[in-house]
Amino acid sequence: MLSSYQPKVEIMTNGHFVSRCSDYIIYSVEAKNIDAVVKTFGPSTKLGAIVGGQTSCKAPEIAAFEAHLPKDVSIVSCHSLHGPGVDPKGQPLVLIKHRASNDDFEFVETVLSCLESKHVYLTHEQHDRITADTQAVTHAAFLSMGAAWMANAQFPWETARYIGGIENVKINVTLRIYSNKWHVYAGLAILNPSAQKQIKQYAESVTELFKLMLGGHKSELRDRVHAARAAVFGDDHENGKKRELLLRDDVLDRYSLGELPEKRLKNNHLSLLAMVDCWWKLGIVPYDHMICSTPLFRMWLGITEYLFRNEDVLEEAIETAIEDNTFRGDDLEFTFAARDWSSRVSLGHFDGYREKFEEIQTYFAPRFPEATRVGNEMIKTILEKTMSSENAEPAPEG
Ligand SMILES: NC(=O)C1=CN([C@@H]2O[C@H](COP(=O)(O)OP(=O)(O)OC[C@H]3O[C@@H](n4cnc5c(N)ncnc54)[C@H](OP(=O)(O)O)[C@@H]3O)[C@@H](O)[C@H]2O)C=CC1
Ligand SMILES: O=C(O)C(=O)Cc1ccc(O)cc1
């Protein structure tokens, strides 16, 4: 039966008309355009209104608000830490009380409470530091996987090498990112200065580990991987109990875009070894950021954890890295891709980022509808599982 409820939506001529009659305005535009958009419409803001933004990197957004909004306007910004197709219920929603009375802040919290997200209170500086660790470097790894698969003219779900378990997460998340808009990823990587540093370190970790593999330096590789493991996963206890793994193989196997092979092929998981190496080199403990984690970050952490917290699985990856040269071609392209993404981000040119992103997007596009469906199911199941264990044992915040 059709509901009799009709939302009152009035399309206005432009942002000036919206600004002058609204009590609360959220700018949800491309991060690279935020200054120009706020400069145009900000001066028309209604006296005493509240203004916020939903961009993924807060430094340029807050700078634009400070530069262009009238002084009597409050600034309360937000950031939903998930993409489209994810139920906002229980997901982190960052709230930034930048320039506002308690009453105005409470008003924003009340309006956004309909999302049923978990409110996380941060300054804009804290937000940008944490999201550089959680989002930007995670995206860099998946973007590089997609670039390498395309460079090798592969559709990974068509080769038995890349099917099942961890590989399903790699494929589904990579396709999910490439099916989104390029400016979302470009904005949060290029405009966040901490992000450039993380992405650069990731590319360096990939290169250095790949060189150890090529040189056959097994004990050096093992020592380095184990040192990184000790730094990142050394303390596997939380609230006095051994931390449960975020992901399980049987859950992961369900979400495949291809046929599961009888026997799983080994992989050296260069992308994951490099991630933990990168966290170690930067002194990052990813669990510290769970409070501000996106679903993709939790899945990325889940598969790195799956590899690193199982002695046999990790040893198999190290052995494969040295003894099995059938991955060399893929790893070479992955190394090039990680370095190329890093240099495009460091150069800070949006066009250079867009060109590469959209070329790879076009290559994978025919599979987006199916990948989105499978990816949404996978995320839903994994989130239900990780959130129910989070709720059972709430981690202390702060
Ligand atoms: N997608 C995601 O997963 C998430 C995105 N974000 C952030 O949210 C913001 C929006 O992202 P998203 O919705 O995905 O991107 P979209 O590209 O879908 O939305 C951006 C919108 O801004 C509009 N816009 C740009 N300039 C103007 C202007 N001068 N006047 C009026 N409208 C304008 C665009 O209109 P037009 O199409 O007509 O150009 C477009 O509709 C970004 O900053 C992103 O980083 C945050 C969390 C998650
Ligand atoms: O989960 C992710 O990392 C995504 O890719 C979706 C996303 C993109 C941009 C954001 O600001 C928040 C979430």
Image: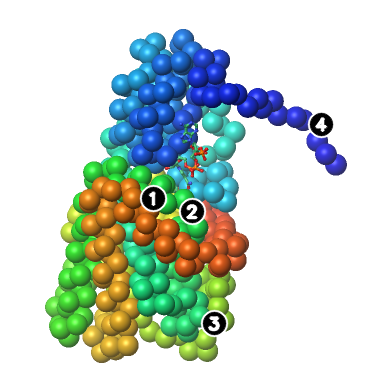
Q: Residue at x 36, y 73 (%)?
A: 151
Mark 1 residue CB less than 8 A from any atom of ligand 2: yes
Distance of label 1 from label 3 (alpha carbons)? 31 Å
Distance of label 1 from label 2 (alpha carbons)? 9 Å
- The mark closer to the camera, 2 or 4, is 2
Asked whether residue 285 appears in the rendered view, the answer is no
Q: Tell me the quarter of the image containing the C terminus.
A: top left
- The mark closer to the camera, 1 or 3, is 1
Numbered tag placed on residue 260 in the rendering: 3
Kindly indicate whether the residue at mark 2 contacts the one at mark 1 (C-beta within 8 angstroms). yes
Label 2 vs 4, first from the N-terminus: 4
Distance of label 4 from label 1 (alpha carbons)? 39 Å
Kindly indicate whether the residue at mark 4 contacts the one at mark 3 (C-beta within 8 angstroms). no
Numbered tag placed on residue 4 in the rendering: 4
Badge 1 is on which residue?
185
Badge 2 is on which residue?
180
Considering every residue shown, the one lying at the far right of the view is: 1
* Amino acid type of the residue tagged 1 in the rendering: Tyr
* Amino acid type of the residue tagged 2 in the rendering: Asn
Mark 2 residue CB less than 8 A from any atom of ligand 1: yes
Disc 2 is placed on an element classified as: loop
* Amino acid type of the residue tagged 4 in the rendering: Ser
